[in-house]
Image (cartoon, rainbow, N blue to C red):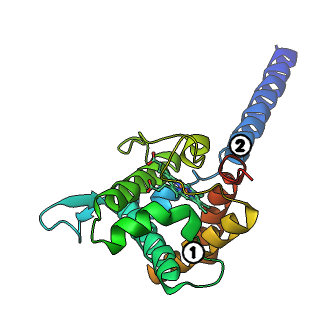
């Protein structure tokens, strides 16, 4: 009997030992949930849309749209000013329209880019992209609105515009900008086609 209870005690210690080990293993295996880029840029919480009085917009989407619109403005301004290395050959159709006061297609481009970034960085529950795939969108043979194919230098220039646009919109956290650049870099291969 005495022998049995010693055995039980040993078994109990063994079991609780396992339980302790497996508990501490669980703790190690469950790191704090990583926020998506969409969440880090404001996520799904709704705020008033500064461009459309009376309407609401998700903060994450608003962050992207603001950076997208500034990027387009910076690109067009450099083209109009004739700055060196501008992307005029690629964006010729847009610049022609905007200079003539027609902003219909630039608004579509802004929406498509905002949809694209929102849907692909964690906002997919409420944001859907329905434009062209990245290869087709940047191949003049498939998308006549792409003036000429982009090369690596054009792509670097484009990333520079996005960085400047992020700064203009108060996105200055270097870790966050690093994550955005990572997303942009992940798309270089399908977009650079010469
Ligand atoms: C990460 C980088 C980029 C992303 C995510 C991106 C994404 C997009 C998207 C979503 C569209 C709209 C497609 C549609 O309407 O169906 C588009 C169109 C276009 N992209 Fe890009 N793009 C990138 C880089 C570039 C670069 C480097 C260039 C040129 C140097 C470029 C030039 C254009 C042009 C000219 C259009 C057509 C604009 C229009 O419809 O008027 N893109 N891009």
Badge 2, how many Cα within 10 Å: few under 14, some, many 20+? few
Q: Position of residue 41 (x, y in %)?
A: 46, 64
Q: CA distance from mark 1 to mark 2?
A: 40 Å
Q: Residue at x 23, y 66 (%)?
A: 49
Tell me the mark number nearer the camera, choosing from 1 and 2: 1
157 displayed left or right of 21 = left
Q: Camera-side residue: 166 or 147?
A: 147
Residue 177: in sight, yes or no?
A: yes
Which picture quadrant has residue 159?
A: bottom right
Which picture quadrant has residue 62?
A: bottom left
Q: What residue is disc 2 on?
A: 29
Is the distance from the Cβ of mark 1 to the nearest ligand 1 atom less than 8 Å?
no
Establish if 93 lies above or below 51: above
Residue lying at the far left in this picture: please name it.
Answer: 54
Secondary structure beneath disc 1?
helix
Q: Position of residue 100 (x, y in %)?
A: 30, 71
Q: Position of residue 92 (x, y in %)?
A: 49, 65
- Total residue callouts: 2
Secondary structure beneath disc 2?
helix
Q: Residue at x 61, y 68 (%)?
A: 158
Residue 35: in sight, yes or no?
A: no
């Amino acid at each position: 009997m005495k022998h049995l209870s010693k055995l039980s005690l040993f078994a109990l210690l063994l079991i609780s030992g396992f339980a302790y080990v497996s508990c501490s293993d669980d703790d190690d295996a469950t790191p704090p949930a990583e926020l998506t880029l969409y969440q880090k840029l404001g996520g799904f919480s709704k705020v008033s849309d500064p461009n459309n009085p009376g309407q609401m917009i998700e903060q994450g989407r608003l962050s992207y749209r603001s950076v997208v619109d500034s990027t387009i403005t910076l690109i067009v301004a450099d083209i109009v000013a004739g700055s060196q290395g501008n992307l005029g050959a690629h964006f010729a159709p847009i610049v022609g329209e905007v200079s003539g006061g027609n902003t219909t297609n630039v608004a579509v481009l802004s929406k498509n880019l905002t949809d694209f970034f929102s849907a692909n960085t964690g906002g997919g529950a409420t944001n859907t992209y329905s434009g062209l795939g990245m290869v087709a969108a940047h191949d003049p043979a498939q998308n006549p609105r792409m003036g000429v194919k982009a090369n690596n230098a054009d792509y670097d220039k484009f990333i520079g515009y996005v960085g400047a646009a992020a700064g203009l919109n108060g996105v200055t956290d270097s870790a966050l900008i690093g994550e955005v650049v990572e997303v942009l870099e992940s798309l270089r291969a399908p977009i650079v086609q010469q």
